[in-house]
Amino acid sequence: MNIRNYNAKEAIVFRKTTEPFGGLSNMASGYALYINEVIIPSSEHLYQAMRYPTNPEIQFEIINQDNAMKAKMISNKYKAQFSRPDWEKIQIKVMRWALEIKLAQNWDKFSTILKETQNKSIVEYATDNKIWGAKPINNDELVGVNALGRLLMELREKYISENNRIFCVNPPDVPALLLYNQHIDIICDDMIIDYHNESLLEDSLV
Ligand SMILES: Nc1nc(O)c(N)c(N[C@@H]2O[C@H](COP(=O)(O)O)[C@@H](O)[C@H]2O)n1
């Protein structure tokens, strides 16, 4: 992905999870995920766990951290030795997928925040991050790959602008997508589907 420039005054720039658009961050709490009967506290926990498909004990340690920043720190501790070797090639696909699951399983809250970004550029403020965010070069401008912001804009375009509620998420096209030694397949939120079916049934009874 190439480097881009963003006008800081016109973009939605998020940094801390406590800010109004903090829910856009993978570090935000309150956006739990559910995959293969495992509750995963945040998209960051999921993303980091996917680095270690053949090390379920590392995945367990990551997933059981009580906040996302700790999950990232645990992952940092292991990555030099145990990260899957193709991680840099697949990490964007894994992040796109993790964000889709975050949206599918937290539709009301996450779609509302995405809607509130209107059609503005979304930028993760980062001073140290190589690809996920963009850093300020003066008061008006941020520069960086901003991969997270761009994936969020992609998500907004695909599901929010098109008013296209997401119920099921296909796995990314990456080999060995494993959680605790189990393959991860398409993920559908049964409760959401049941609810949707009930509404359809009620509609047909009216
Ligand atoms: N170092 C750091 N501090 C923060 O406050 C952040 N929000 C981030 N960004 C997030 O880090 C995740 C990617 O981690 P890797 O560097 O690929 O291990 C991703 O969720 C970024 O949005 N980083």
Image (spheres, rainbow, N blue to C red):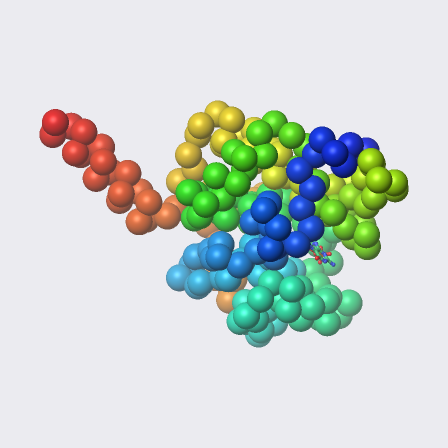
Name the quadrant where ligand 1 sits: bottom right
Residue 97, by quadrant, is top right
User: In the rendered image, is residue 68 in sight?
Assistant: yes
Residue extending farthest to the left is 205
The picture places residue 73, in percent across and down from the top left corner, at 69, 68
User: In the rendered image, is residue 59 in sight?
Assistant: no
Q: Residue at position x 81%, y 45% from top?
A: 135
Q: Is the residue 75 above or below the residue 172 in the image?
A: below
Q: Residue at position x 44%, y 63% from top?
A: 38
Q: Residue at position x 40%, y 40% from top?
A: 167
In the image, taking residue 64 as reference, residue 12 lies left or right, namely right
Decide which of 63, 24 is in the foreground and name it.
24
Picture quarter with the C terminus? top left
The picture places residue 40, in percent across and down from the top left corner, at 49, 61
Residue 134, by quadrant, is top right
Picture quarter with the N terminus? top right
